[in-house]
Image (cartoon, helix red, strand yellow):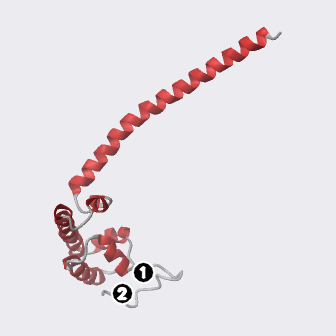
């Protein structure tokens, strides 16, 4: 496992660690070993193993072309393994679908499309509901006026 020796105090309230290119390159090797393990079905396992969160990977990719390529390859390898597993019944496809956007750019684009379509349906429905509520409030107000005139 890659170690960033002498880089600072990241855990326990010290200054944040600075990860150099050599560290990121070594981490890339660890990532590829993880991805090539047949038991690896999610990049979250690598996150748990290393302690780095998903957003750290972007910074490592900026510092190291090797890490950037390893991350892309790891996504492809694990994504393919997940697809095969879902197709042959080894994996529960619904479970894999929850974070499939990480592994497949087409899935991510389709999910973004579906969200936009859903919002196009939701906004008019919200406006209609608001108009209905406003009309009901006006009707109630009119009825209260009529009632108060009748009771005078």
| Figure quadrant of residue 144 | top right
Using the numbered discs, state the Cα–Cα distance from disc 2 to disc 1 in whole angstroms. Answer: 8 Å
Q: What is the quadrant of the N terminus in the image?
A: bottom left
Q: Position of residue 41 (x, y in %)?
A: 26, 71
Q: On the picture, is 147 further left or further right than 46? A: right
Q: Residue furthest bottom?
A: 6
Q: Position of residue 81 (x, y in %)?
A: 18, 69
| Figure quadrant of residue 102 | bottom left
Q: Position of residue 9 (x, y in %)?
A: 47, 85
Q: Nearer the viewer, residue 6 or 108?
A: 108
Q: On the picture, is 89 further left or further right than 57? A: left
Q: Nearer the viewer, residue 136 or 28?
A: 136
Instruction: Rate crowding at label 1 as few (under 14), some (14 to 19) or many (20 or more) other CA atoms within 10 Å.
Output: some
Q: On the picture, is 84 further left or further right than 118? A: left
Disc 2 and disc 1 in contact, CB within 8 angstroms: yes
What secondary structure is marked by label 2? loop
Residue 4: mark: 2
Residue where numbered disc 1 is placed: 17
Q: Is residue 140 above or below residue 115?
A: above
Residue occupying the point 32% across, 75% down: 45
Mark 2 or 1, nearer chain start: 2
Q: Position of residue 130 (x, y in %)?
A: 53, 29
């Amino acid at each position: 496992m890659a170690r960033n020796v002498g880089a600072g105090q990241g855990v326990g309230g010290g200054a944040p660690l600075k990860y150099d290119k050599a560290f990121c390159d070594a981490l890339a090797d660890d990532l590829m070993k993880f991805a090539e393990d047949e038991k690896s079905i999610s990049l979250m396992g690598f996150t748990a193993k290393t302690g780095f969160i998903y957003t750290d990977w972007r910074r490592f990719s900026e510092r190291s072309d090797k890490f950037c390529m390893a991350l892309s390859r790891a996504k492809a390898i694990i994504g393919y393994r997940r697809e095969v597993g879902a197709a042959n019944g080894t994996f529960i496809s619904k479970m894999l679908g929850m974070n499939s956007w990480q592994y497949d750019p087409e899935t991510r684009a389709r999910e973004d499309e579906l969200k936009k379509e859903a919002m196009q349906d939701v906004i008019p429905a919200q406006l209609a509901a608001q108009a209905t509520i406003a009309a009901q409030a006006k009707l109630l107000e009119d009825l209260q006026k009529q009632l108060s005139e009748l009771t005078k």
